[in-house]
Amino acid sequence: MRTIAVYTLGCKVNQYDTEAMLELFERAGYVSAPFDSEADIYLINTCTVTGTGDQKSLKTVRRVARLHPDCAIIVCGCLAQRLADEILKMDNVRLVLGVTKRGQVVELIERALNENTRINAVETLKNAPFEKLAVSRHEGKTRATMKIQEGCDRWCTYCIIPAVRGPVRSMPLCEVRAEARRLAEAGYREIVVTGIHLASYGRGTKDTLIDAIAAVHDTPGVERVRLGSLEPLVADDAFARRLSEMPKLARQFHLSMQSGSAGVLKRMNRRYTPEEYLSACDTLRKYMPGCAITTDVIAGFPGETGEEFAETEAFIQRVNFARIHVFPYSRRSGTRADRMENQVPENIKHERTQKLIQIGNKMEESYVYNSVGTVQRVLFEQPAGKGLAEGYTGEYIRVRANAVPGAFEWVRILRTEGTLAIGETIEDGR
C-alpha cells in the first residue's frame, strides 16, 4: 500500500488545496504519513508571494530528495506555476502542477511512475475555469473553509499573485449552496468563506458576493459564517446593511490595508485612499457596532519616507484595529515594485516592522480587554486542560473557559491575559 505525505507553504487557500488533494489520494487507497517520516510520494504545495516563500519552497523540495532518495515528489502551487521547467529538473520531482489540474493529481503521478517519466502539467491560466476541490476534514470538526473564488486581476505593484493564480473565476452559486449543505451535514458549525480575491466573486455572472454569503448563511445546520480577506471598497452602505441582517455572520472583517499613506497606496496601485478605507471601516461599524476590523500592513515599501511611515502609524491609530498583521516589504521578481527606485534598506524595514507590531499588539490587547463583562458566543475548538477548552468569538477573540471542544456556548468574559480572554460558560446568553 503506497503512502503519501504532504506539506503546505503559504496561505489558507493553499492549505485548502493541499487537503483536497490529500483526500483524493486517500480515496484512491493511499495512506497518509507524517511529512517527516518515510513515504512513497511527497506532495509540496509551494508559495511565491515573497522571495522567502520561494526559498523555503525550493529548500523543502531539495531536503526531501536528499533524505528520501527513492521517493517521488509532486510540486504544485504558485511557485510551481511560475517555475515549472526549473522545478521539473530537480532530483526526484516526477510531477509539477500549478494551480489547475489538481483534481487529476493521483492520475497524473501514477502515469508518471508507471511510464517512468516526469510530467509538467502546468498550463496557461487564460480562460481557466474554476476548479472545484472538495474537503471533508477541517480544523477540529468545528470550522470548515470553503474556497468559492480563484484568481485576481488587481495587479498591485508588489504582488505576483495575478500572474500565478490567473484570472478571476468563481464557484457557481448552486455549488456554493451544495457545498455548504455538505459541510453542515458533516457536522461543521462554522464555515469560513474565502478566495484569492473574495470581493471579485461572481465577476462576469449575475451572482454577487453577498449572494454567496447569504447562501452559506441560510444553510440549515450552519451556526456561524466568517469571511476571508475583503477589499475595503466592497464595504459600502448596501453591503454592510445586508451583512448586518445576517445574525449568524461573524462580526470580524479583515480589510486589507497595506499602508496608511496616500502616496504609498498609489505606488502600490491599491485603488483606494486612506479616507476611502476609513469610510469602509466607519460603514461596517455603523451597522455592526463593536465589530472587529483586522488588517495587513506592509512596512518599508519602495520609496517609503519617514513621513509616509509616520502617516501609516497615525492612520493605524485612527482606525483602531482589533488586530494587524505586519510584513516587511519583500522584493518579488516580475513585479513593478521590484524595479522601483529608492528601495528601503533592510535594517529600516525591520525597524519599522517591529514598531508596527508593537502598536498592533497593544491594540489587540485593548480590544480583548474591552470585552470584559460582556457575554459572547464561543465556538470551542481545542482542549486547554483541567476541563477547559479554547475557542473563538465571532469577533475572533480567543477565549478559554469551562467547556469541551466542539461546544458552542455562551460565555461571560471575566478577565484577560494579554490577548486571551478568560470566561465562564452560562446558560442561554444571560
Image (tube, rainbow, N blue to C red):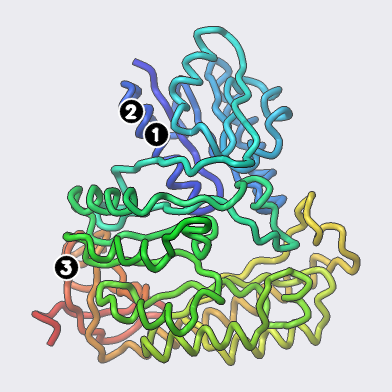
Mark 3 or mark 2: whose residue is earlier in sequence: 2
Tell me the distance, in whole angstroms, between the alpha carbons under discs 3 and 2: 33 Å
The quadrant holding residue 290 is bottom left
Q: Nearer the viewer, residue 381 or 147?
A: 147
Q: In the picture provided, is 276 more to the left or to the right than 18?
A: right
Q: In the picture provided, is 86 more to the left or to the right than 153?
A: right
Q: Nearer the viewer, residue 329 or 17?
A: 17
Q: Circle 2 is placed at which residue position?
A: 26
Q: Nearer the viewer, residue 347 or 117?
A: 117
Q: Circle 1 is placed at which residue position?
A: 22
Q: Circle 3 is placed at which residue position?
A: 403
| Amino acid bearing label 1 | Leu
> Does residue 39 show up?
yes
Q: Position of residue 390 (x, y in %)?
A: 27, 67
Q: Position of residue 52 (x, y in %)?
A: 68, 50
Q: Residues within 10 Å of mark 3 (few under 14, many from 20)?
A: many
Dots 2 and 1: beta carbons under 8 Å?
A: yes
Q: Position of residue 377 (x, y in %)?
A: 22, 76
Q: Residues within 10 Å of mark 1 (few under 14, many from 20)?
A: many
Tell me the distance, in whole angstroms, between the alpha carbons under discs 2 and 1: 6 Å
Q: Residue furthest right?
A: 341
Does dot 3 land on a helix, a strand or a loop? loop
Q: Given this view, does label 1 or label 3 mark the residue nearer the observer?
A: 1
| Amino acid bearing label 2 | Glu
